[in-house]
Amino acid sequence: MAFIDEVNSSLASPPPSSQLEPSKVLHLRNLPEECTEQDIKSIARAHGDGDVPRVLFLSRKHQAFVEFKTLEESARMLAHSIANPIRLGTRVIIAQYSNKPEISTPQRDEVGPDGSPLKSAGDGGKVLLVTVTNVLYPVNIDCVHKVFQMSGKVEKIVTFQKQGKTQALVQFQTAAEAAEAVPRFQGQNIYSGCNKLQIQYSHLSDVTVNYNNDRSFDFTNLSLPPGELSLGIAGSSPMHVLGSHGRGALAFPTALGGSRASDGIMGDFFTGSRG
């Protein structure tokens, strides 16, 4: 049986912990929606002797497999999770030994774009979870829309903070447009040397937007109320900046020293070298 089939089987009906032999691989469940592969690695690193060799992160299923270098390391994390439940966000992570001795990396056609195992190849959907690191300039609807509209028609955007991270859900009109955006913007800086993008597929098939303001916006329903506005760049709502068709002038933010961040993705957009 191929590893990917074994993974699908264990996800469907994980065996009781009492029936599992010790393994270097731990199966983690009940992961929160905002969890990333880096979160998993950080948790595992705290209980191991350095970086973990392999992680298979199944974001859509809120689960992951973590392979340690030794049985002692995996046993240490498992014992800790039982004595002191590991919390991530609002959830308690459930850990148990995997019935697999090691993680075999699935082939490209065996997993979705977010790493979730598939019985057959398929697209990853049209909603992206975007994490912005090294944030020096504001991240709001205007900024996110300007970037991702380069790859297609953006229908909805929701920005939020989770565990100190600046994140956004970006929904495209089609899965093909989302698929184009992932390799195009992954690891890129929105501005020169800062606001770096980390992109993965969300397990959501549709983003719920209740208000149109600088934290959330439904470009398919311009009649939504503004709710409680949180003033962004220049204290403007998204439609004031973007205009009635989602386009318009957006000034580059100015750094404390007075220099403008006119490089990165946004610089390319305004100079016409992208899209």
Image (tube, rainbow, N blue to C red):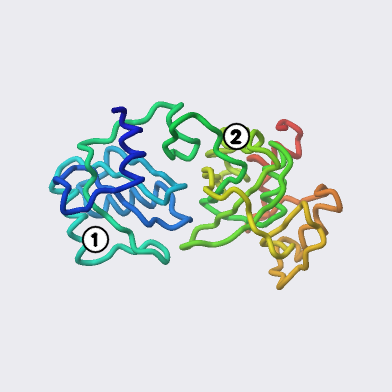
Residue beneath the point at 46% across and 63% down: 163
| Residue farthest to the right, as pictured | 244
- As helix, strand or loop, the secondary structure at mark 1 comes to helix
Q: Residues within 10 Å of mark 1 (few under 14, many from 20)?
A: some
Q: Position of residue 38 (x, y in %)?
A: 39, 48
Please tell me which residue lies in front, 214 or 128: 128
Q: Please tell me which residue is depicted at 20% across the width and 47% down the height of the picture.
A: 49
Where residue 179 sits, quadrant-wise, is top right
Instruction: Determine whether, in the image, residue 71 is placed left or right of residue 106.
Output: left
Estimate the spatial distance between the alpha carbons at disc 1 and disc 2, rounded to whole Å: 36 Å
Residue at 24%, 61% in the rendered image: 81
Q: Position of residue 19 (x, y in %)?
A: 16, 49
Towards the viewer: 166 or 68? 68
Earlier residue among tags 1 and 2: 1
Amino acid under disc 1: Ser
Question: Is 12 drawn above or below residue 181 in the view shown?
Answer: below
Quadrant placement of the N terminus: top left
Up-down relation of residue 270 to residue 134 (above or below): above
| Residue that numbered label 1 is attached to | 81
Q: Secondary structure at mark 2?
A: helix
Residue at the spot of label 2: 179
Of residue 174 and residue 6, the one placed in the foreground of this image is: 6
Badge 2 crowding class, 10 Å Cα cut-off, few under 14, some 14 to 19, many 20 or more, is many
Q: Are marks 1 and 2 in contact (CB under 8 Å)?
A: no
Q: How many marks?
A: 2
| Residue 207 % position (x, y) | 63, 54
Please tell me which residue is depicted at 31% across the width and 43% down the height of the picture.
10
Quadrant where the C terminus is found in the figure: top right
| Amino acid marked by disc 2 | Ala
Residue furthest to the front in view is 13
Q: Position of residue 151 (x, y in %)?
A: 69, 36
Q: Nearer the viewer, residue 50 or 258?
A: 50
